[in-house]
Image (spheres, helix red, strand yellow):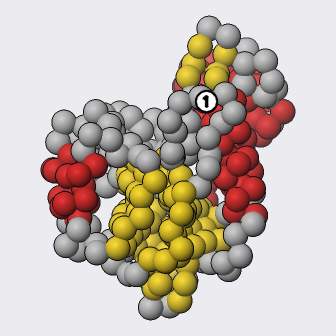
Amino acid sequence: MTAVLAVLLALLLAGHRLVPGRGGHLGSLLEAFLPWLGLGVPVLLAAALLRRSRAALLAVLLPVLAWTVLFGGRLLPADGGRVDLTVVQHNVDDGNADPEGTAKALLDRHADLVALEELASGAAVYERVLAGAYPYRARSGTVGLWSRYPLTDARPVDLKPSSVHVYWKRGVRATVHTPQGEVAVYVAHLPSVRLRADGFATAERDESARRLAAVIDGEPARRLILLGDLNSTLDDRGIAPLTSRLVPARSGFDFSWPAGLPLARIDQVLCRGAVPVSTRTLPATGSDHLPVEARIRL
């Protein structure tokens, strides 16, 4: 039985794209927590050792190999070399009880760009605290970008799903004039997903991801950075329209949500025409997400 379970775990890891995505979006649910399937390996290994089964021990190597192929690269050190731009991405949580403390914590990172989502009641606080270090700002609805460098061509990006019929502005785009040249920077907050009785509800998020991908396809700038709460991990097929076009930093796992016990990184930094050298999560603020900091080479 242990050998059979090990083979099944290996098949699930290696063939996760074959898990059906329709009728409950089980494939997306699996992929949202895919790295955690590796926890099955020590359990199976212990069972194989207790049974003193050579066949079971050999079978356990299969999920080890599958997990290593998928995620082993993230355990390697980050790419070294020159860094031109440091960015911080943070969903600050519209229920944040300490927006000033959160803003000051972000300010202490001395990043070049700060992208925020869920700017609601605390928006004025973030603007006041960040204004001195970041004189350039672009906002649309509940998302915003703060920059040390001049911004031009700032405009909203329409990511609203067709099923949403209320005020909904969660995307903004601006050209950042860095010392290394112009970069198009997008800030986006894709719709949340929910686990319901009928499955994993991802339709609105997936539609927004496709809308954003279409906008990016039409973006003329050679260098582009996407910062945002995408409500999806890099392995989730739901944002494949974005991950197939843009490149993340693959070092580390950097789980960013929920802040108290991070299980998944749904806050992302993706690039085109630039090298995302590394990403890492930062200490908790008053939000239910952890901030994510990325270093980028232009």
Apparent side of residue 64 relative to residue 138 in the rendered image (left or right): right
Which residue is painted at 73% across and 14% down in the image?
1
Q: In this view, does 139 lie above or below 288?
A: below
Q: Is residue 159 above or below residue 244?
A: above
Residue 74 seen in this snapshot: no
Given the image, on which type of amino acid does mark 1 rest? Val
Q: Residue 264 location in percent, x, y?
A: 49, 39
Q: Residue 165 location in percent, x, y?
A: 59, 29
Q: Residue 121 location in percent, x, y?
A: 26, 40
- Considering every residue shown, the one lying at the far top of the view is 197
Question: Where is mark 1, residue-wise?
Answer: 164
Q: Is residue 21 above or below residue 208?
A: above
Which residue is painted at 56% across and 42% down in the image?
190
Which residue is painted at 84% across and 33% down in the image?
18
Most foreground residue, 79 or 182: 182
Query: Crowding at label 1, few (<14), some or many (≥20) Cα neighbours within 10 Å?
Result: few
Q: How many marks?
A: 1
Apparent side of residue 79 relative to residue 280 in the rendered image (left or right): right
Residue 125 seen in this snapshot: yes
From the image, which quarter does the C terminus lie in?
bottom right
Secondary structure at numbered mark 1: loop
Most foreground residue, 253 or 206: 206
Most foreground residue, 193 or 139: 139
Which residue is painted at 50% across and 68% down in the image?
154
Q: Residue 124 location in percent, x, y?
A: 23, 52
Apparent side of residue 33 relative to residue 216 in the rendered image (left or right): left
Q: In this view, does 128 lie above or below 38?
A: below
Apparent side of residue 256 relative to residue 170 in the rendered image (left or right): left
